Amino acid sequence: MLKVFDGFGHSNWVTNVRTCLCSNGFAYVWEAQEIICPNQFLSIFVQRLKDQYIQSWHESCERNSKLLYYRQFKNTYTPSNYVLMIDIDKFRKCLANFRSSSHELMVEKGRHFNIDRDFRYCPYCETVLEDEYHFICHCPLYHDLRKKYLPVLINSYISIQQFIDISGDENHHNILNLSMFIYHVLELRSKYVND
């Protein structure tokens, strides 16, 4: 009866089933109204839905300009290792927020105030874009903390590719140090901006 109503153009939950089957390449199942091997079909159908979702996730990451760095070090739809490696909540949360651009840096905050991206300057340097790269690798305000937690970044020019490698590093020691650095630097930045 619901299928008949759907056929007459009256939407109901069967309409959603038909749409889901047809949009994922299984219109023949809808037309036949039967499945020969239900377990096999369910396995294939669930995998198709997962694949479609992952493809959609990749497309949305590519379209979102906010995720400029994120999409360069996170290209698989799987939990990152740091989620399990970092057992201190405040550091894990800080790193997750930083990697997904959910932070107070001007590159993100300026977006909320409609400041052109090129003018979202570092509050300390005043003439340099305050993005994740500048924050981690170059801002002189954080030199001492960088020396303590990320000594590999001292006394050398760090390219954007090296920054991406550091941000996506899966080594337990390195990723823990990065998360502690970000946590303490954000605290220092907050004090500096508020003063």
Image (cartoon, rainbow, N blue to C red):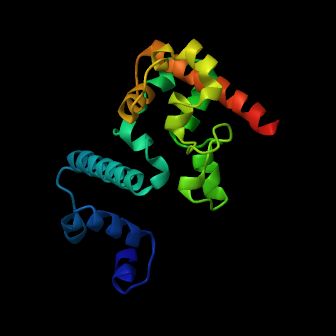
Q: Residue at x 34, y 40 (%)?
A: 75
Q: Is residue 77 at least partly visible in the picture?
A: no
Pick the residue in front: 7 or 16: 16
**In this rendering, position of residue 120 left or right of residue 54:** right
For the view shown, which residue lies furthest in the bottom direction? 8
For the view shown, which residue lies furthest in the right direction? 195
Q: Is residue 194 at least partly visible in the picture?
A: yes
Look at the picture and state if 186 lies above or below 17.
above
Query: Which image quarter: residue 167?
Result: top left
For the view shown, which residue lies furthest in the front direction? 127
Q: Residue at x 34, y 69 (%)?
A: 19
Quadrant of the frame with the C terminus: top right
Residue 3 rendering spot, x and y as whole percentages: 35, 76
Look at the picture and state if 91 lies above or below 40.
above
Pick the residue in front: 34 or 6: 6
Give the total of numbered labels.
0
Residue 81 rendering spot, x and y as whole percentages: 43, 24
Residue 32 rendering spot, x and y as whole percentages: 19, 68
Pick the residue in front: 126 or 86: 126
Residue 57 rendering spot, x and y as whole percentages: 39, 50
Q: Residue at x 53, y 22 (%)?
A: 178
Quadrant of the frame with the N terminus: bottom left
Q: Residue at x 70, y 32 (%)?
A: 189
**In this rendering, position of residue 22 left or right of residue 80:** left
